[in-house]
Image (spheres, coloured by chain):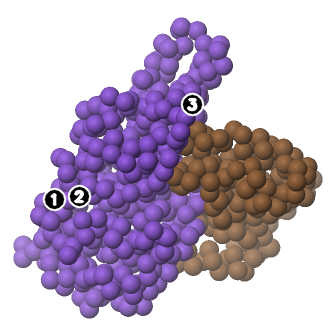
Chain colours: A brown, B purple
Amino acid sequence: MNQSTKTNSTKKESTENDNSQANARTISSILTAPELAEIDHEISHAPTRSAVAIDALKIVQKHHGWVSDESLSGLADYLDMSTAELDGIATFYSLIYRKPVGEKVISLCNSVTCWIKGYAQLEKHISRQLGVGLGETTTDNRYTFLPAPCLGACDRAPVMMVGEETHLDLTPEKINQILEIKGGQQG
Amino acid sequence: MISKLPLTQNINAARDPVNLEAYEANHGYQAARKAVLEMSPDDCLQVVKDSGLRGRGGAGFPTGMKWSFVPMNTDSQGNNVSDGHKYLICNADEMEPGTFKDRLLMECDPHQLIEGMILSAWTIQADVAYIFIRHEYHFASKLLQDAIDACYAKGYLGKDIFGSDFNLELYVHSSAGRYICGEETALISSLEGKRANPRAKPPFPQISGLWGRPTIVNNVETLCNITHIIRNGAQWYKTLGIGQDHGTKLFGVSGRVKNPGCWELPMGTPIRELIEQHAGGMQDGYKLRGFLPGGASTDFLVEEHLDLAMDYDVIGKAGSRLGTGTMIILDDKTCPVGMTKNLVEFFAQESCGFCTPCRDGLPWSAQVLDDIESGNGIPADLNTLQNQVRFIGAIGNTIVL
């Protein structure tokens, strides 16, 4: 809390002194060169800077795992947008994480076909095995457990994604293998 | 011999992706080359209109008619006099619960989609195209990007494609989630980097779409059909359906059936054939209680509807919609109230939050269904449900029925 207050007041002073220099400083300390290069590439084929807002949020998230308040305001400056406007976009989209997540996100499909084929049982199983509920991260920071809308593989339900991998025809045993849970261990 | 099942003709049982070389070995890009070099946009539009193709994203709107509203800006000699960009967008945001057909087309035969997009862009004279794909389809995104790169290298995309003076840039845009992005005006807002709020029409995207420019948004399967319609002609296409509608369709069945899956079959295939033959009938110990014919937002049908043809108008007259053609089975051991609650919770969660009946009515309905399911319902709940959903449209009907 103290830190963020400090950042804000520093930023306010510099804004009064020299807006563009202050922005350049803020951005270069928050967004890294590789991130900026990827964001610039998106801007190169977009009609306005703010048009790449969603792509840029995804780029920041790819590099940091999530989008912090500091990244968000740095990015907003870079895209000539207000922080509030960019946060409105970031919080609208379910796959932009505004809170830290674990190394991998478990996205367990809770839509209709997976629900019919045993979603509730699998949700309980994962919760019990990892010691976390939906929306929570394991204490070892390996996994964040989230529900997901239909993942488009209903013929192989129940389905989940772990990171970028999709896993089909789930059973409790199969989940243990995928998540490398050894015989009933508590997380 | 032209395949009777054109959309999946290159796809094997193991679902191995088809590369450019294999795609070209089976007449790939011949239609695109021919159209760009020898056919006028008007010629192509006429073939698509004559084919009777209807949009495969769920609404079933005639594709040729949709395209005909794009201003063509031709002079008195019929030459194209461009006054700025026109856009073609492929809607690959497959998020309707129970739907898993576009994934198959993109993960197995990406060039079929790209060729369909070149043909469609030529017809409406779009110079920039996007594939708006849901974030979770990582494999399809990568495969499409590799296929696009291969096309640029061969001069099938970019400047002066196939040696003509037609230019087309094609980009893959991976989304950041939210079901509402599948609605075309919301999709356009999202592509502009904004919150995916839909907007009222008119103006229609054909006149004022992406960045205020003429834009066409078509579903993956619709665009894949274009490849074969231009390749083989409208008359051939019309011989493929066995009911009122033309062509073939990817149909799917999921739920407690023996062999859930997705198959290309003639339009008008009877529901019974889909469930009993292709999906192998119900699993042992389960009976059919009802089904959603084409995704989560289509109304329940029951046993008496099994002999209906999977055609847009036939299913529409029965009180539901063909939707995406991928049906979800309700069995006798699954609680219909619980299933409806699951559907309503999905729509409540995915509401963009702009209009009150959806933003507030759906969570309220989910709560009432929860009360009914847990045995705490009262007779007045039924009135509450009807009141809450009367302005929401299709999903409202699903709840009340």
Does the CB distance between marks 1 and 2 fall below 8 Å?
A: yes
Name the mark on residue B334: 3
Indicate the position of residue B113 as horizontal and vertical percent values: 37, 70
Q: How far apart are marks 1 and 3 (CA)?
A: 40 Å
Q: Which residue is drawn at 20% across and 79% down?
A: B35
Q: Which chain is indicated by disc 3?
A: B
Indicate the position of residue B340 as horizontal and vertical percent values: 53, 30
Depicted A122 relative to depicted B133: above or below:
above
- Considering depth in this image, is B69 or A40 the residue closer to the camera? B69
Indicate the position of residue B281 as horizontal and vertical percent values: 44, 43
Task: Give the residue type that dot 2 points to.
Answer: Gly
- Residue that mark 1 sits on: B238
Q: Residue at x 63, y 61 (%)?
A: A166
Position of A135 compared to A47: left or right? right
- Considering depth in this image, is B371 or A26 the residue closer to the camera? B371
Local packing at callout 1 (Cα closer than 10 Å; few below 14, some 14-19, many 20+) is some
From this viewpoint, which residue is outermost toward the front?
Answer: B284
Q: Residue at x 55, y 63 (%)?
A: B137
Q: Which chain is indicated by disc 1?
A: B
Which mark's residue is nearer the viewer, 2 or 3?
Answer: 3
Is label 3 in a helix, a strand or a loop?
loop
Task: Give the residue type that dot 1 points to.
Answer: Lys
- Considering depth in this image, is B257 or B154 the residue closer to the camera? B257
- Residue that mark 2 sits on: B247
Q: How many numbered marks are there?
A: 3
Indicate the position of residue A50 as horizontal and vertical percent values: 56, 64
Is label 2 in a helix, a strand or a loop?
loop
Mark nearer the N terminus (1 vs 3): 1
